[in-house]
Amino acid sequence: VSALDVLLIITELNAGGSRDLRNSGLPRTPYFDVSGESFLSALDVLSVINFINARSNGGGGAGEAARPPVATDPAPVQAGAESTLLTPAAPPVEKLSRSPFADDEFLSELETLSQLTQP
């Protein structure tokens, strides 16, 4: 399992959108329905990404950088100081909507997934 698997699923989603795979005529390999629900969707992409992220623990493969060191001592906080929020690593769904590769159904599923993963 690699980033290439993610790209293959995204390419298939871009080509035909989210859809039922039961009688789609797609070949059995590459395996697009990783969630096992007989439906190609953004959930399949997210499942592969989560698998890759869970598997990487900082060792990294050839040509991959190790994760940056994590600070063990928190920075001192001054009373009354304004809080700084971290920005998300991925662009918001609104920015993705301007992409020529994102159809409405894909964006809707992505929005649903992002709401499910927010704390």
Image (cartoon, rainbow, N blue to C red):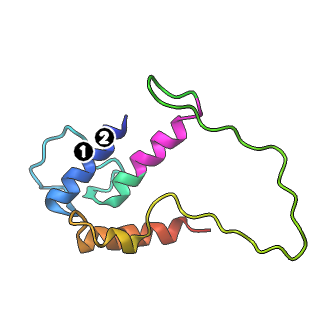
User: Which residue: 63% across, 38% down?
Assistant: 68
Number of the label disc, if any, that sits on residue 8 = 1
* Residue pointed to by mark 2: 5
Q: Quadrant of the C terminus?
A: bottom right
* Neighbours of disc 1 within 10 Å: few (<14), some (14-19), many (20+): some
Q: Quadrant of the N terminus?
A: top left
Query: Image quadrant of residue 94?
Result: bottom left
Magenta residues span: 47-58
Amino acid on which the number 1 mark rests in the picture: Leu
Q: How many numbered callouts?
A: 2
**Coordinates of residue 50 in the picture (x, y in percent):** 47, 47
Element type where label 1 sits in the image: helix
Residue 61 located within the stretch drawn in magenta: no
Q: Does residue 82 lie above or below 30 as drawn?
A: below
Is 92 displayed left or right of 79 in the figure?
left
User: Which residue: 76% across, 44% down?
Assistant: 71
Q: Does residue 108 lie above or below 40 as drawn?
A: below
Is 117 displayed left or right of 74 in the figure?
left
Asked if disc 1 and disc 2 are in contact, CB closer than 8 Å, the reply is yes
Instruction: Provide the major secondary structure of the magenta segment.
Output: helix
Query: Image quadrant of residue 27?
Result: top left
Amino acid on which the number 2 mark rests in the picture: Asp
User: Which residue: 52% across, 35% down?
Assistant: 55
